[in-house]
Amino acid sequence: MISPEALNELIRTRRSTFPDQFVAGKPVDDGIVREILTNATWAPNHGKAEPWHFTVFKGEGLQQFANFQSELYKQLAGANFKEITYQKLQNQPLKASHIIALGMKRTPNPNIPEMEDIAAVACAVQNMYLSVTAYGLGGYWTTGGITFKPEAKSFFNLGDDDKLLGFFYIGHVAIPSTGAKRAALEEKVTWVG
């Protein structure tokens, strides 16, 4: 078992590591990514529904992901198209070792509210964050780009009632994140009794 002190340290040192902070071209071992995904699947979820669906991109798959998201953006942007956004969608994925598309497969049980399925996937992502930290890797959850575009769902094997909740980037850390702060506990907690 992990000690409470070690757990506190793990949680409090977790940081988002952005793609520009990764070691370019250095892959993470697939076995480690499998462990990270396994840890993700141990997240709490209502009714044992396990509503997550992960699509993992690596190697040449990163280019496929980059092409799909940049071209979908171009197709849907119309008059709001920006070349800088297109280029970012093309280039950022190639800085990661692995990218995990975070899908939420809607539970068919009508007694489970959609919000609980979304929360379960968010808990799974927190498990990913803690896992990459424990492995000394960097991770980043983004909900940018094509995340909220219904037209993107089928590429990630998601149906109409499912949701794409973003992407989790994994890589080796070249430039560590620093300087995180949190508000005083008293500002965020009310004790009753």
Image (cartoon, rainbow, N blue to C red):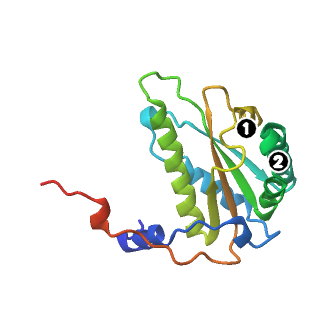
The residue furthest front is: 79
Q: Where is residue 77 shown, x and y percent of the image?
A: 78, 41
The circle drawn on residue 70 is 2
Of residue 38 and residue 92, the one placed in the foreground of this image is 92
Residue 181: name its quadrant: bottom left
Q: Where is residue 46 shown, x and y percent of the image?
A: 43, 35
Mark 1 or mark 2: name the one nearer the start of the chain.
2
Amino acid type of disc 2? Ser
Q: Residues within 10 Å of mark 2 (few under 14, many from 20)?
A: some
Determine which residue is flagged by label 1.
Answer: 156
Amino acid type of disc 1? Phe
- In this picture, residue 8 sits left or right of residue 171: left
The circle drawn on residue 83 is none
Residue 42 visible in this rendered orientation of the protein: no
Q: Where is residue 64 shown, x and y percent of the image?
A: 85, 47
> Helix, strand or loop at disc 2?
helix
Instruction: Tell me if residue 133 comes above or below residue 189 in the rendering.
Output: below
